[in-house]
């Protein structure tokens, strides 16, 4: 169980840093290149924001799912005590 938790935490941290890295790289590329056919800096920034947004949504979903499971378990245990 601990190994699964550590793996999940490392993946979450990696995706966070990848998103931040893409966002910063997009800002640097945009500041150094003025005219490019596909705006590379903007594309990198959009990818970075997308990675961060998906990570945030997954975190919220995981938190809510865990809360619902704990609430359901507590409700069932409370019903058994009566």
Image: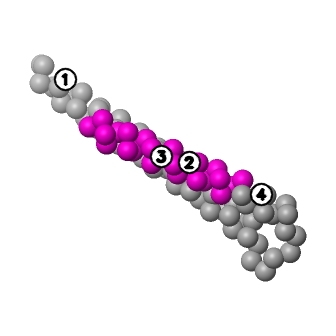
Q: Which residue is mark 1?
A: 78
Task: Give the Cα distance between marks 2 and 4.
Answer: 17 Å
Secondary structure at badge 1 equals: helix
N-terminal-most mark, 4 or 1: 4
- Tell me if label 2 and label 3 are in contact, CB under 8 Å: yes
In the image, the segment drawn in magenta is 1-24
Secondary structure at badge 3 equals: helix
Task: Give the Cα distance between marks 1 and 2.
Answer: 39 Å
Chief SS of the magenta region: helix
Task: Give the Cα distance between marks 4 and 1.
Answer: 54 Å
Secondary structure at badge 2 equals: helix
Q: Which residue is mark 4?
A: 27
Q: Position of 1 compared to 23: left or right?
A: left
Mark closer to the observer (3, 1): 3
N-terminal-most mark, 1 or 2: 2
Q: Which residue is mark 2?
A: 16
Sort mark 1 into few (<14), some (14-19) or many (20+) by Cα contacts within 10 Å.
Answer: few
- Residue plotted at (81% across, 76% down): 36
Q: Which residue is mark 3?
A: 12
Regarding residue 49, the answer to whether it shows in the image is no
């Amino acid at each position: 169980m601990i190994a699964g938790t550590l793996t999940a935490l490392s993946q979450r941290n990696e995706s966070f840093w990848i998103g931040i890295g893409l966002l910063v790289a997009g800002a640097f590329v945009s500041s150094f290149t003025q005219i490019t056919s596909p705006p590379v800096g903007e594309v990198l920034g959009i990818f970075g924001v997308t990675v961060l947004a998906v990570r945030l949504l997954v975190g919220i979903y995981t938190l809510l799912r865990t809360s619902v499971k704990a609430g359901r378990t507590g409700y069932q245990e409370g019903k058994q005590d009566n």
